[in-house]
């Protein structure tokens, strides 16, 4: 694999954003330290090792949760599977785990850029409010990465309203991959859309994935959903850039449904570790929504999947369309 410069500009999601006041009280600098695999601004071919240190840790905030299961969290399932859990808010069930994915995705982005492939994502719905237009330039102008300025303002107001009520919000993120050549993916057990769905579903707050028209295709006629084939490719893209598990050369479009943050200050029914029924009101520095912080995570997972497939043997490059 050729070397590339990891200091090249990445996506719109890599810089600091003023979204914390809307969604999270945490203050992590997220400074990445490169431990190996990069020398004088280029990759060396050895494994790239990165570390992101947590600087704003307050484990004591979780002391009250040691003997109680939080609704909507993996507390009980983790205890049932392993017989032990880290109740201090960390570990593999923590959203903090995704910082490593974003760092790896930044590396994948550099590699894919050499092949003319780009990935970007945006917030198309939050708290029941949907973007009514898709201006990709707008996502750099508001803290929620929303492509519709008017909808972004309505989303911000919705966040403040729900935060005051002690509740949380879910939403929908759309991911767009451009420049992918036709031929990525396998027809049965390694379908590109299956791998993308698996990668995106591995993100903790994601509860649904769709490609192209997705669930909306169920309401369409075949004549409406089929993408007409032309000499230059396709005249539409209802398939979202993937047919038969293989990329078509059109834009790859995916959307994920993000559940509301389960840590809320409203009373909820639960039980203690010994099975005693109780209620819980979760305190501490908890996010109102996984959006917009989940947006770069979704980008990263798509970047990693595409980089994986671009590194596979790719005989389709040697063929011409019949």
Image (cartoon, rainbow, N blue to C red):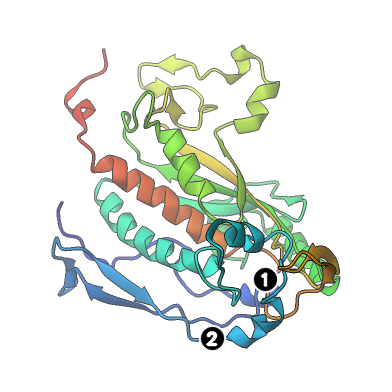
The Cα atoms of the two marked residues, 1 and 2, are separated by: 14 Å
Q: Residue at x 80, y 63 (%)?
A: 270
Above or below — where is 247 with respect to 115?
above
Q: Tell me, for residue 287, which label it has, or none.
A: 1
**Quadrant of residue 90 in the image?**
bottom right
Q: Is residue 186 left or right of residue 269?
A: left
Q: Is residue 65 left or right of residue 116?
A: right
Q: Residue at x 24, y 51 (%)?
A: 114
Q: Residue at x 33, y 56 (%)?
A: 109
State the SS at label 1. loop
Residue 88 seen in this snapshot:
yes
Q: Residue at x 54, y 86 (%)?
A: 56
Give percent across and percent down for residue 159. 76, 66
Marks counted in the figure total 2
Above or below — where is 81 with respect to 175?
below
Q: Is residue 10 left or right of residue 320?
A: right
**Residues under numbered marks 1 and 2 in contact, where contact means CB atoms less than 8 Å apart:** no
Q: Residue furthest front?
A: 274
Classify the position of the C terminus by image quarter.
top left
Give percent across and percent down for residue 255. 57, 43
């Amino acid at each position: 694999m050729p070397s590339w410069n990891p200091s090249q500009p990445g996506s719109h999601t890599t810089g600091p954003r003023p979204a914390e006041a809307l969604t999270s009280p945490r203050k992590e600098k997220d400074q990445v330290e490169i431990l190996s695999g990069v020398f004088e601004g280029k990759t060396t071919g050895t494994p790239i090792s990165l570390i992101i240190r947590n600087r704003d840790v307050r484990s004591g905030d979780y002391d009250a949760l040691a003997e109680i299961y939080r609704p909507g969290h993996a507390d009980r399932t983790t205890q049932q599977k392993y017989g032990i859990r880290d109740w201090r808010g960390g570990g593999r069930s923590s959203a903090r785990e995704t910082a490593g994915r974003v760092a790896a995705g930044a590396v994948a982005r550099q590699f894919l850029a050499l092949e003319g492939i780009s990935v970007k994502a945006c917030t198309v719905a939050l708290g029941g409010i949907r973007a009514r237009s898709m201006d990709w330039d707008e996502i750099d102008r508001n803290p929620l990465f929303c492509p519709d300025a008017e909808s972004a303002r309505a989303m911000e107001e919705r966040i403040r309203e729900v935060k005051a009520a002690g509740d949380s919000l879910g939403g929908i993120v759309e991911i767009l991959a451009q420049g992918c050549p036709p031929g990525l993916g396998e027809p049965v057990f390694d379908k590109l859309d299956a791998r993308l769905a698996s990668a995106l579903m591995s993100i903790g707050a994601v509860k649904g994935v769709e490609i192209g028209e997705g669930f909306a295709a169920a309401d369409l006629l075949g004549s409406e959903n089929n993408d007409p084939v032309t000499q230059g490719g396709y005249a539409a893209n209802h398939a979202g850039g993937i047919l038969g598990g293989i990329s078509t050369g059109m834009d790859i479009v995916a959307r994920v449904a993000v559940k509301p943050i389960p840590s809320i200050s409203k009373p909820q029914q639960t039980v203690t570790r010994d099975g005693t029924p109780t209620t819980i009101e979760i305190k501490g520095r908890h996010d109102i929504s996984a959006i917009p912080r989940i947006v770069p995570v979704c980008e990263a997972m798509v970047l990693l999947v595409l980089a994986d497939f671009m590194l596979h043997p790719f005989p389709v490059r040697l063929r011409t369309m019949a």
